[in-house]
Amino acid sequence: MKRRRSAIVGLAALAASILVLAQSPANLLQNPGFENQLPGGWTTVPATASYGLIYRSEAMVHGGKYSLRLFPTSVNTSPLAAGNLGVTQTLAIQPYLGKPLYFSAWMDVRGPVTALVRLIGLTSGGDLYFRQLKQDAQTPAMVFHRDILDLPNDPTLIALFVSCSVQGADGVATFDDVTVSNDPSLTNWPMGQPDPGPPLEATVVIRTDQTVRRVPASMFGMNLEWV
């Protein structure tokens, strides 16, 4: 009897853990923290492969052991993120048409370069819907960035991809814990929680001996604000 009860308890615990996993918000990216060897779900643009070095680094991380580092050279001079040194990952787009996608990343730069994370929807006609995260100031530690891409319900949208790239030719850009999700909680969006700011202090002085404005007798008994 005890053995059977233990088995039932074990199955219940397993079912509960499976339910929690099923309900957990999902990051749509593979290898978002670059803990696995590259490419690991990411791809490089062959035309920009000679623009610098792409490697995993332990020198600066936000979570885990590794981050992505892009070390551009003097030929990394394109003004467009798609033409710069970087990596991309393609995602399914049909499930998210007409819905918001929340994305975030931890980023850092050293030197006169700009780190970019872009979430891009591509149409069959070549048009783009995109938002980007940008880090171009050197800070003591990695900086958290986040944004929302509202994908329209456009039947011509055929592809969705995210890119981590660097603009500039002298420095290094670092990326870690990149997230794309249709669940705002995964990117720490405080939805429906406005910040009213600190309490405001005010002083009201009532001078009973002075008449500012008389209330018409016809309004007696009404709920009103008289200014």
Image (spheres, rainbow, N blue to C red):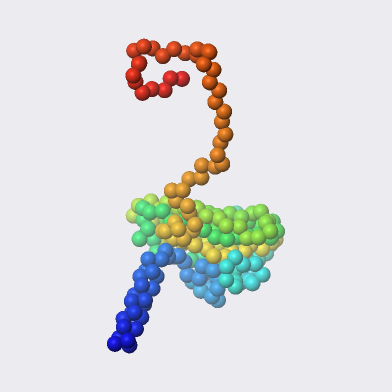
Q: Quadrant of residue 165?
A: bottom right
Front in this rendered view, residue 14 or 100: 14
For image coordinates 42% across by 51% down, the residue present is: 150
Is the N terminus in the top left, top right, bottom left or bottom right quadrant? bottom left
Query: Can I make out residue 132 in this image?
Result: yes
Residue 8: x and y in percent read 31, 81
- The count of marks equals 0
Front in this rendered view, residue 65 or 152: 65
For image coordinates 42% across by 59% down, the residue present is: 183
Q: Is residue 11 above or below residue 84?
A: below
Q: Quadrant of residue 144?
A: bottom right
Residue 180: x and y in percent read 47, 61
Left or right: 211 in relation to 3: right
Q: Is residue 38 above or below residue 168?
A: below
Left or right: 93 in relation to 58: left
Left or right: 19 in relation to 61: left
